[in-house]
Image (cartoon, grey):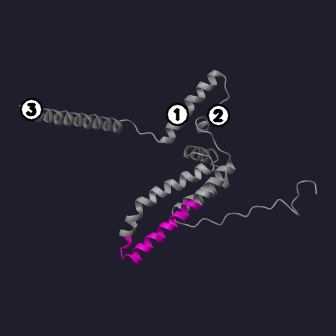
Amino acid sequence: MVLASDGARAAGLALAVTLCGAAYVLVHEHRRKQKKLRPKQSAANADEQAAEQQAQQQSEQGAPVKEGLAAVVNVIEKDVLIATLYDTATAAYSLIEQTRRAVYQLHTEKGYSVDDARKMVHDDFQSNMATVLRAVQHKHSVTEMQIAASHKYYKDDARVNEAFAIMQNAMNGEAPPPPRAQAVTRTGKARRRGGR
């Protein structure tokens, strides 16, 4: 009798788990279908609508109003944006070159075909690229949203567009130009401390 009740409990538990799983699938499918039926809006469009709503609320309260995405996300300084884009280009290209060398090494030393070697390193490459991009963003204390909003804000600036193009080309495997030499501002001897 004890074994029969344990079997009945196990069967009841299995049935309950199956019903919960089925309910989850039905709810998920319903949400997915509803999402398809809604008119699609791009992320930028949604951000702009949020910015307009926030600007309207601020104007009603008498606060100064920023336009567009600048109201939602802090726009970073132009020089910080350019430096971030150049650093991203350099870091991304460096990672791409490391990955190319790894693929070549797997091909020549281990005998894998180039496609098989590429497939082997693909997941690591994507993970490493995300890490590299986060590291550059952390170095400059910016977020991806700030970079996107700032690029949109400075869209008419030639230097920003050049830096953005360099970053895109680097992401596509083209070597970025060497960093520009910094102008030397000090001339002569360094000053000594201590009055001597």
Question: What x and y, as percent, mark residue 59?
Answer: 63, 25
Residue at the image point whose x is 56% and y is 53% from the top: 135
Quarter of the picture holding the N terminus: top left
Q: Earlier in the sequence, mark 1 or mark 2?
A: 1
Dot 1 crowding, Cα within 10 Å, few <14, some 14–19, many 20+:
some
Given residues 190 and 135, the one toward you in this image is: 190
The residue wearing badge 3 is 2
Residue matched to label 2: 66
State the mark number for residue 190.
Answer: none
Q: Earlier in the sequence, mark 1 or mark 3?
A: 3
Image quadrant where residue 51 sits: top right
Determine whether the residue tagged by mark 1 lies in a helix, strand or loop: helix
Question: Mark 3 Cα within 10 Å, few/some/many (few <14, many 20+)?
Answer: few
**Where does residue 43 sit, x and y in percent of width and height?**
48, 41
Q: Nearer the viewer, residue 10 or 185?
A: 10
Bounds of the magenta span?
A: 90-115
Say which residue label 1 marks.
49
Query: Quick one: which residue is furthest to the front in this view?
Result: 2
Q: Extreme left residue here? A: 1
